[in-house]
Structure formats: C-alpha cells, structure tokens
C-alpha cells in the first residue's frame, strides 16, 4: 500500500534558483536517511551533481525558448512523495517502485532522482523531477487531476508487485503523508518485546539464565512454566514467546545462545545507527579565548577523549601505527582523489560544451530564415530592432561554429551519443571518486588529530624556510 502526493517546488524566500534547487535535492539525498546514498537512483542525471544538471537544463531552456525564470510563479521542479505501509516492503524494492512511478508519470521526458528514506516508521521515497524537459524546449505544467494521476499509476505498480492498495483513498492527498499513515502510532507490546529480545541476544549472554537476567533488568516480569512469557511495566497480560512469530520461541532463543542457530536482529524493526566517524579534535584554548564558558570546556574535553579513542581505533584497524606510514597513506589518498577529481572535471567540461553546442545548433536552425531576410534587407536597422533577439542568437551560434577545431558542425545525434558515453563514464568514475573522497577525509582527519595530540605542526618546516629566506 502506498500513498502519494505531488508537490510543486518554487524558489525559496530570499534565495537564488541554484540555492533553492540544491537545498531540496540535498535534503532528499541526506546520507543519514538513505543509508549513505545506497538508496539513491536517477534518470538522465547523476545524484552527486543533480542540482547542477537541473540548473544547466534551465539555462538551456532559456537559450532555446528565450523565456526566463520568474521570481515566484514558475516552478523549479516537482516532487512526488510515495509512502508505504510499515512492514510491507523493503527499502530497495521501494526505490525501484519509485523509479518506475517517476518513469511512467514523466514518460521519460524529464530528469529525476529517487531517494528512499528509512528514518521513519514507514519507508518513503522522495522523487524529484526537473520541470524542464530533456530537450530543453518545454516545461511540465501541473494539470487538474495530476495528483490523482500519480496515485493511479502508483496503485497500478503496487498491484503489479503484489502489494496492497488503499481501498478508500479519500483524503490521503490532503494530509501529510506520514500523518495519514499514522507515524505516531505507538509500538505494540509484542513489537517492543521483540526489540528487547534482539537487544538482549546482541549482548551475547553466556547462557539462558544470563539472557533472562538481561530481560529482567530491561524491566520485564518473567513467568516460567509450560510456556515462557514476559510482561512489561503497565502491561496487563503476559506475552508468550511463541506468539511473537518465527525465530522467537524459547527453543529458538536457546539455540541462538548456544550457537546452534544464526542470530539475525533484522527480524524486527531495529533502529539503524549511523557508523561512528572520526571528527577533528576541538581546539579548547582557542574556543575559550573566543568566549566559550566552563560548560563548553567540560563538553569539549569529553568530546576530544572520544575522538582520540576513535582515531586510535581507526589507525589500529588500518595498520597505520607508524607515523611515516600514516603520512605516506594520507599523501596517496589525496593524490588518488585529485586524479579522479580532475578526470571527472574534464568529462563535465566536455559535457557542458556539448550542451552549449546543441543549443547553438538548435538556435541556428530556428533563426536562419530571419537572418537571411535581415541580410537581404541590407542589414536594415529597422529590421534589426524588430528581430534583435533572433539575430543575436544566430550570430552567437555562427561564432561558436567558427571556433570549432574541425570547422565542421557535428550533428545533434552524434553530440547526443557522445554525451551519453561521457555520462556513463562519469557515473562509473563517481563510485571510485566517492570512495576516494571518503577515504581521504578519514585519513586526513586521523592525521590531523595525531598531529594535534603529538603537538606536531606539519607547516613548521615551511615556516622555518620562510624565516630563513626573510
């Protein structure tokens, strides 16, 4: 079962078009909501650069049509929120269904990204598609009944994937999507008990008695007999383990403790915790001089201790206990990132050139007759004043063609083929680029923390050389 909602996205108050687009797409791509980007998919754009690609399409639209983005009325993009019934679908399947919904609704004529969020009780996807079409000649216009059209397509896809649909959809497009699904509905006693059992088994108790002790410390009253049962504080009746479903019987628990059966905490809803990351140590003295008080100093000392321990764990896990090895590894990671970054910039530059050249080809074809008439009119000033826009576009296109190395105008088809090849290469490079960036950030942060803990200033040799030269 899925609810849907179609939302138009305008320019934010006191914000530029670029900032508005980036703010909306960055929220959708939030790593904490999309499992570090695992639940992202896109069509005719890259999730990493979706805001820039949307913006480029809007600039091409202005060049092709001559229409400018108005401050308030025009729509930058549209967002479809598709939310699923809790426990009915996996996040990966939700992302695929969101992609299919976007493709069917836009008919493949618009760029879009699908970001599936798992931070709520219900899995939901944010589908953002560019208002401008791929050929940059027109824009999507919201029509009467568009929300109903989205809902019908969504329901059809749900049925195709053997998911339930809402029998009475009245009102679901007029409420917040999470509120309609009942996000704030409290967990049942059975679900709470499953989560507590999972937490107890995660602690790896030595035996069944230790397991019962953990459950007792968690606030559960235990009743042993023919059927093992637990009762939480405020609960009227005991809940038998056998009523919790597969994997939660007393024998299952005993087998897991004894190692006879694998333990999988994913059987119930488990809160996903973000992996711990190394952060830079706080310069406490500098903060105190800047006006921070004793409370901040106490917090900063605890924070620095945690980050020092985290840094040591990182260095131990990666075998970087010698400073020279750490320094060498940091240099290698930085160099690798810079190489990949340069490669991607070259590809992006060429893609931008192709986009501009395609626009000039279109403009040249559209304004050729006007410019021919202008030439036959003896370059009349009156004719120029009437058709200045078309004449300037024609001249700009001709200047661009004259600057081509081969002095031969390529076809739009060949440019599109080259663009698609470059886009595929860019997507392939981005996976390595993202990993390299993450590795570089981690190791440089660890090195900076080590330098601070050892009191070592990596810029000292450079400063000494500058002093000697002076």
Image (cartoon, rainbow, N blue to C red):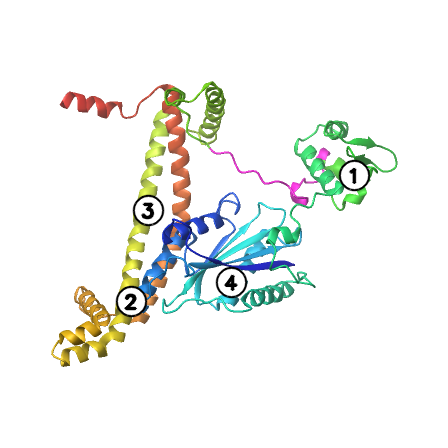
Mark 3 and mark 4 in contact? Answer it, CB < 8 Å: no
Q: Is residue 271 above or below residue 311?
A: below
For this rendering, which residue is in front, 192 or 285?
285
For this rendering, which residue is in front, 377 or 54?
377
Q: Is residue 242 visible?
A: yes
Mark 2 and mark 1 in contact? Answer it, CB < 8 Å: no
Secondary structure category for the residue under label 1: helix
Q: Earlier in the sequence, mark 2 or mark 3?
A: 3
Secondary structure category for the residue under label 4: helix
Q: Which residue occupies 48% across, 34% down?
A: 277
Q: Is residue 57 above or below residue 182?
A: below
Q: Which residues are magenta?
A: 257-277
Q: Nearer the viewer, mark 4 or mark 1?
A: 4
Residue at the spot of label 2? 359
Q: Please tell me how crowded label 1 is: few (under 14), some (14-19), or many (20+) other residues with Cα within 10 Å.
A: few
Q: Quadrant of the N terminus?
A: bottom right
Q: Is residue 425 visible?
A: no
Q: Earlier in the sequence, mark 4 or mark 1?
A: 4
Rendered location of residue 46, percent (x, y): 41, 55
Q: Please tell me how crowded label 2 is: few (under 14), some (14-19), or many (20+) other residues with Cα within 10 Å.
A: many
Residue at the spot of label 4? 102
**Which SS type dominates the magenta stretch?**
loop
Residue 341's label in the rendered image is 3
Q: Nearer the viewer, mark 2 or mark 1?
A: 2
- 274 sits to left or right of 426: right
Residue 251's label in the rendered image is 1
């Amino acid at each position: 079962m899925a609810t849907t909602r179609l939302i138009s996205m305008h320019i934010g108050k006191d914000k530029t078009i670029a900032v508005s687009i980036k703010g909306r797409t960055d929220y959708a791509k939030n790593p904490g909501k999309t499992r570090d980007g695992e639940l992202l998919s896109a069509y005719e754009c890259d999730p990493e650069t979706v805001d820039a690609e949307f913006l480029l399409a809007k600039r091409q639209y202005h060049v092709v049509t001559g229409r400018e983005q108005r401050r308030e009325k025009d729509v930058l993009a549209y967002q479809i929120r598709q939310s699923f019934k809790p426990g009915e679908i996996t996040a990966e399947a939700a992302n695929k269904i969101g992609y299919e919904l976007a493709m069917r609704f836009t008919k493949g004529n618009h760029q879009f990204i699908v970001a599936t969020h798992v931070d709520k009780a219900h899995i939901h996807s944010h589908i953002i598609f560019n208002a401008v079409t791929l050929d940059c000649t027109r824009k999507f216009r919201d029509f009467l009944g568009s929300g109903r059209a989205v809902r019908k397509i969504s329901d059809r896809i749900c049925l195709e994937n053997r998911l339930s649909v809402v029998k009475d959809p009245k009102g679901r497009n007029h409420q917040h999507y999470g509120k309609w699904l009942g996000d704030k509905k409290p967990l049942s006693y059975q679900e709470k008990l499953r989560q507590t059992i999972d937490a107890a088994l995660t602690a790896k108790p030595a035996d069944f008695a230790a397991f019962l002790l953990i459950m007792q410390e968690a606030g559960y009253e235990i009743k042993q007999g023919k059927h093992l049962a637990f009762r939480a504080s405020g609960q009227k009746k005991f809940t038998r383990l056998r009523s919790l479903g597969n994997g939660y019987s007393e024998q299952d628990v005993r087998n897991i403790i004894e190692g006879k059966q694998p333990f999988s905490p994913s059987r119930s809803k488990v809160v996903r915790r973000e992996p711990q990351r190394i952060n830079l140590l706080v310069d406490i003295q500098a903060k105190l001089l800047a006006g921070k008080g004793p409370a901040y100093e106490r917090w900063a000392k605890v924070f620095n201790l945690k980050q020092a321990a985290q840094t040591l764990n990182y260095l131990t896990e990666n075998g970087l206990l010698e400073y020279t090895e750490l320094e060498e590894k940091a240099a290698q990671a930085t160099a690798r990132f810079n190489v990949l970054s340069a490669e991607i910039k070259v590809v992006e530059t060429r893609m931008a050139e192709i986009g501009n050249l395609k626009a000039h080809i279109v403009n040249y074809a559209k304004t050729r007759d006007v410019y021919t008439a202008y030439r036959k009119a003896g370059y009349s000033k009156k004719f120029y004043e009437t058709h200045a826009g078309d004449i300037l576009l024609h001249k700009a296109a001709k200047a661009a063609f004259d600057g081509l190395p081969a002095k031969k105008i390529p076809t739009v088809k060949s440019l599109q083929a080259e663009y698609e090849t470059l886009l595929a290469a860019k997507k392939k490079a981005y996976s390595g680029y993202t990993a390299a960036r993450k590795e570089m950030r981690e190791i440089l942060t660890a090195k900076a923390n080590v330098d601070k803990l050892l009191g070592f200033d990596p810029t000292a040799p450079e400063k000494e050389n500058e002093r000697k030269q002076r």
